[in-house]
Image (cartoon, rainbow, N blue to C red):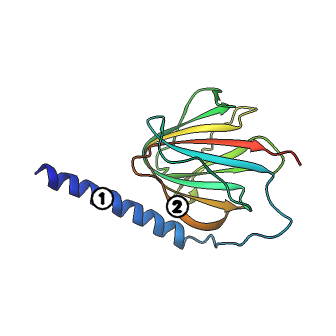
């Protein structure tokens, strides 16, 4: 009985991941190729964790990306930080959100953040404390992420490592 329950839970999780990958892949956001001479001088990186413990390696944005879209499952919170130190109170995700987008500007510290459902903005964007340049996001499960450039998908969606339920996001502004 226990093995059947485990198999059913695994099947539901795999189906959810496939559905989200399909939604992202078939969204109205086309893939784009990099153009010479344009691009961010700000590097964004994410690190997947399970209950705050790193799993997998730190992943930094490829050239020609200035935002990221992350799909998750379950309840969640986001804690904005300045150089890793908590700034303000954690913000709970609004009802109905199952993904979010974070975007940053070249040559600037800081970023924008929006709650989404299946890639569509649902409003209720959290107030980002002044000076915040990173955040910690926690959910029941992180499913998949995709890098984008001005909202257009760059590359294929990337599944989160097995067991991931948090993401650390940080920005580093590179001098020109």
Side (left or right) of 151 relative to 156: right
Give the foreground label among 2 and 1.
2
Does label 2 or label 1 sit earlier along the sequence?
1
Side (left or right) of 146 relative to 56: right
Q: Residues within 10 Å of mark 2 (few under 14, many from 20)?
A: few
In whole angstroms, how far apart are the C-alphas of marks 2 and 1?
19 Å
> Could one spot residue 105 in this view of the protein?
no
At 62% from the left edge and 39% from the top edge, which residue is drawn?
Answer: 126
Residue 14 horizontal/vertical position (percent)? 34, 61
Residue 18 horizontal/vertical position (percent)? 40, 66
At 76% from the left edge and 32% from the top edge, which residue is drawn?
Answer: 131
**Residue farthest to the right, as pictured:** 176
Q: Which residue is mark 2?
A: 158
Q: Which residue is mark 1?
A: 12
At 73% from the left edge and 61% from the top edge, which residue is drawn?
Answer: 63
At 84% from the left edge and 47% from the top edge, which residue is drawn?
Answer: 107
- Labels in figure, total: 2
Q: Quadrant of residue 29?
A: bottom right
């Amino acid at each position: 009985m226990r093995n059947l329950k485990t198999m059913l839970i695994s099947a539901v999780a795999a189906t959810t991941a496939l559905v989200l990958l399909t939604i992202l892949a078939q969204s109205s956001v086309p893939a784009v190729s990099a153009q010479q001479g344009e691009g961010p001088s700000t590097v964004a990186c994410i690190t997947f964790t399970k209950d705050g413990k790193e799993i997998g390696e730190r992943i930094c944005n490829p050239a020609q990306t200035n935002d990221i879209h992350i799909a998750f499952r379950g309840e969640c919170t986001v804690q904005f930080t300045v150089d890793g130190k908590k700034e303000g109170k954690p913000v709970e995700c609004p009802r109905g959100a199952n993904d979010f987008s974070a975007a940053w500007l070249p040559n600037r510290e800081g970023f924008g953040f929006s709650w989404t459902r299946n890639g569509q903005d649902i409003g209720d964007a959290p107030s980002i404390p002044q000076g915040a340049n990173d955040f910690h996001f926690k959910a029941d499960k992180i499913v998949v992420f995709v890098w984008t450039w001005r909202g257009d998908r760059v590359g294929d969606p990337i599944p989160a490592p097995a067991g991931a339920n948090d993401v650390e996001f940080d920005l580093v502004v590179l001098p020109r």
